[in-house]
Image (spheres, rainbow, N blue to C red):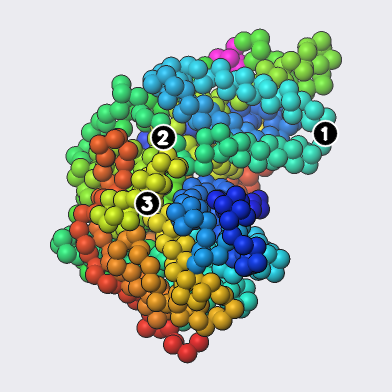
Amino acid sequence: MTATLFFVQALNGLQFGLILFLIAAGLTLVFGVMDFINLAHGVQYMVGAYLVAAFSTWTGSFGWALLLALPSALAFGLLLEALVFRHLYDRDHLDQVLATFGVILFLNQGVKFVWGAAPLSVPVPELLSGSVEIANGLLYPVYRLAIIAAGLVIAALLYVLVNHTRVGMLVRAGASNAAMVSALGVNIQRLFMVVFGFGAMLAGFAGAMVAPILSVEPGMGDNILILAFVVIVIGGIGSIRGAFLAALLIGLVDTVGRSFAPNLLRLVLDPAAASQTGRAIAPMLIYIFMAAVLFFRPSGLFPVKR
Amino acid sequence: MNATIKTLGLAAAVTLTAAPAMAQEKLKVGLLLTLSGPSAVLGQHARDGFQLAMKDLGGKLGGRDVEVIVVDDELKPDVAVTKVKGLIERDKVDFVVGPIFSNVAVATHKPIVDSKTFYISVNAGPSNLAGKSCNPYFFATSYQNDQNHEVLGKVAQDRGYKKVYLLAPNYQAGKDALAGFKRHYKGEIVEESYTPLNTLDFQSELAKIASMQPDAIFTFMPGGMGVNLVKQYRAAGLADRIPFLSAFTVDETNLPAQQDAAIGMLSGSNWAPNMDTPENKKFVAAYEAAYNTVPASYAMHSYDAALLIDAALKATGGKTDNKDAVRAAIQKAEFKSLRGDFKFGANGFPVQDFYLVKAAKRSDGKLQTEIAEKVFDNYADAYAKECAPTN
């Protein structure tokens, strides 16, 4: 039983990690390429979830909702870029943090104004609503497997895009030395816009994918934003590859740790103390992990060469 | 977010017909509720319940015109204390009605009762305010926090469940919930699992539950956490195999989002929208017509709070200056509660019936909780005896 339970928890960790990756990918690009701290990235995840909720009530189908939500999330990201973020690129980090924090407050209140404070629900698409029996009595929802598949596909696409296309090359170059790229005659303003819009769309996609399994509510992006920052710091700021690996590691450490920390401690402590300490330690695990990684690799697992 | 709401119907009717000579000063009631953040919907139910009562009472309490001042505590005790001081010192309110959350209740208790203002809770019932720190200026139209959990513990015990899995968020109310459950449940607890507050993905806990195969699970997951847990519990195929007992998790604030996933899940409450009294039927219908959603118990408690104030002031002839007379009138609770039997214990908390309720779909497609069976009759809370009658 423990082996299957471990397998299921690993799947959960993988799924959580891939969602984190979708958010962190945009964040690490924006931070790495533009040296811009965007606290409002988590809100874009929330907006993606709200868009899919709104479109799925309107069209009655999750597939259509997703198709409509992606360009809308992209448009929304570009709108924010043009209205707010563009004016902040040359400011220092504190200004960026303050302004993007303001955007968080504004949008959290905004969605509440439009959709109300009560959590919204998005039905799981009919096609993916069943579950597979992994072992005796252990069911795993098909939709979560679909999230894993979608996450892996996006990761592969990103890999091709960043490593084997011209835009990807410019993005990588921008991450290493933006001023030099600009001096070579590349419209860095436009590159920034593309990166930004793309990052917003990825976050929106993550939000749209989790909408059927989580509740869509104001502020849902705030907690995940902290984890996304942990991911990009561990992965190395600006590195997609680092973000991917770090996201999976965080997903696994968090899920498996939460589930097995008390059991492991039980080997050395008496049961009551073990469950007490276990539940105290489990939420800390990812931060302990981050501290350990940074101790040995201060600029993350895959630092971008400068 | 200070909103002053002039109560309805007072404008035209009163000024035209009533003689200005008998104009009494307006009664002021401060509503202290959580109206922003993820839990805002709870405060909205309470606010709407109170305002519906004001409408039904013709905009008057005990024959006096009323000014209702709504403030948002933002679920932050420090913010709440500042706003409460505003209500007491600037607005000079006669009653404070609210709050939803116990941490807000504990923080604001002292400033309110010290100023000899009556504090009527419409949800929060922390154990210390029911027990050692009970106060003659504090009343609750709701319950003591543990009681809804005790209902499920009793049900689990009576149904002979041998192994129960407990799941709660890792904060004070979560621990209190599990303690409340254990008051009447004597079987084996296979696991007491605490998740970080605001966890939204329970997949790893669900895998654990599926592998441990308990006879039932008990959980306390208010707000968005409850929406997710219920949907994921159903999706994991557990809902039909392992009974889901909960409190403040499957209720009318969460049901619109949980939808069919919640049907059949059990919960504990002192009331349900389908309760069969004429007053309650009228209340539920009026609430739905006005706010387009099925009321939750928060709305009922605060509707009752308005009725309570109205009845008390009728007994004192609308006067509030003799505090002892007002208190005696409140203590008598001479109003028809929407939940049926209602009286106050010596600690200012209700002595009332508790029910096992079950989520169900109505014929119009909306979801609500419905009474399955009565679990406790005229039930007082466990802390009442710690309340010294002298203070």
Residue A54 percent coordinates (x, y): 48, 26
Counting from the top left corner in percent of width and height, residue A160 is at 55, 14
Which residue lies under the disc numbered 3? Answer: B283
Q: Amino acid at mark 1?
A: Arg
Q: How dense is the environment of label 2, judged by Cα within 10 Å: few (below 14), some, or many (20 and up)?
A: many
Q: Quadrant of residue A193?
A: top right
Query: Magenta segment range?
Result: A158-164
Q: Could you say where residue A50 lies in the image, as x and y percent from the top left?
A: 51, 30
* A56 versus B247 height, above or below: above
Q: Are marks 3 and 2 in contact (CB under 8 Å)?
A: no
Q: Amino acid at mark 2?
A: Ser
Estimate the spatial distance between the alpha carbons at disc 2 and disc 1, rounded to whole Å. 39 Å
Report the mark closest to the observer, 1 or 3: 3
Number of the label disc, if any, that sits on residue B278: none
Helix, strand or loop under label 1? loop
- Which residue type carries mark 3? Phe
Which residue is at a point 65% across and 26% down the rendered structure image? A29
Which quadrant of the figure contains the N terminus of chain A? Answer: top left
Residue A145 seen anywhere in this rendered image of the structure: no
Q: Which mark is residue A91?
A: 1
Q: In the picture shown, does residue A251 fall above or below B14? A: above
Left/right of residue B243 with respect to residue B73 in the rendered view? left
Q: Taking the image as drawn, is residue A79 in sight? A: yes
Tag 3 and tag 2 share a subunit:
no
Instruction: Tell me the number on the disc at residue A121.
Output: 2
Residue found 52% across the figure and 35% down from its top? A115
